Image: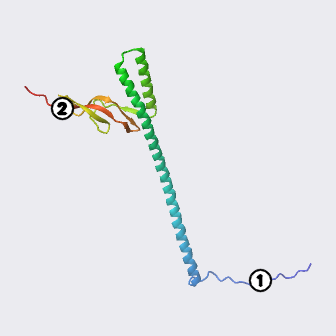
Amino acid sequence: MSHEPEPTSPAVEPQGPPPTDHPQVQQLTEQLQAAHKRVNELAHALQAGERDRAEFKERLNRERERMLDVEKGKVAVTLLEAVDQLDRCLQAADDSPLARGVKMIRESILKQAEGTGVERVELTGRPFDPNLAEASDMEITPVAEDDGKVVLVLKACYQLNGRVIRPGVVKVARYVKPASA
């Protein structure tokens, strides 16, 4: 085996960084800066899109929950109408075994409705609130402190998750100063 000298490439002497005043370097630097700016813009747009998607998802979930509450409310109102009919039956009935059975059914329906979040709003003795009830009648009272208070509930008010699903029907006291003789 003979040792032949390996061909060598011509010596390239390092020239150092290219001059920055060279037009091609300036053009490439500008393109690089523009590319960085565009990447930043796209990154910000992507982040904004992700935020919008997350907010949309939250709005969609809230709307779905609200729609479920509306549907629950509709079903509950139907059940509450049945409870009202049972109440009317109980008012006309004596204390027979049949009446006790009807009362048990009524209590069972109310308990099931409460299990879904439906709650009865007690109105008697409270100041009349048109957001909770309709005033169907007025009762004159000589007591000034009772003016505007609910004295009788004719139809109960019910709420579901803080939203009135069925307003009550009430009788409201109206103060009239007693006549002096």
For disc 1, the neighbor class at 10 Å (few under 14, some 14 to 19, many from 20) is: few
Image mark for residue 107? none
In the rendered image, the vertical position of residue 88 relative to residue 38, given as above or below? above
Q: Position of residue 39 (x, y in %)?
A: 55, 68
What is the three-letter code of the residue carrying label 1? Ser
- Left or right: 170 in relation to 115: left
In the rendered image, the vertical position of residue 167 relative to residue 33, given as above or below? above
Q: Position of residue 111 (x, y in %)?
A: 44, 28
Q: Could you say whether the residue bearing mark 1 is in a helix, strand or loop? A: loop
Furthest residue to the top?
96
Furthest residue to the right?
1
Of 26 and 61, the residue lying toward us: 61
- Left or right: 155 in relation to 116: left
For disc 2, the neighbor class at 10 Å (few under 14, some 14 to 19, many from 20) is: some
Q: Nearer the viewer, mark 2 or mark 1?
A: 2
Q: Residue at x 36, y 18 (%)?
A: 93
Q: Quadrant of residue 131?
A: top left
Q: Could you say whether the residue bearing mark 2 is in a helix, strand or loop? A: strand
Q: Quadrant of residue 19?
A: bottom right
What is the three-letter code of the residue carrying label 2? Tyr
Q: Residue at x 71, y 83 (%)?
A: 12
Q: Which residue is mark 1?
A: 9
Q: Position of residue 151 (x, y in %)?
A: 26, 29
- Discs 2, 1 touching: Cβ within 8 Å: no
Q: Which residue is mark 2?
A: 175
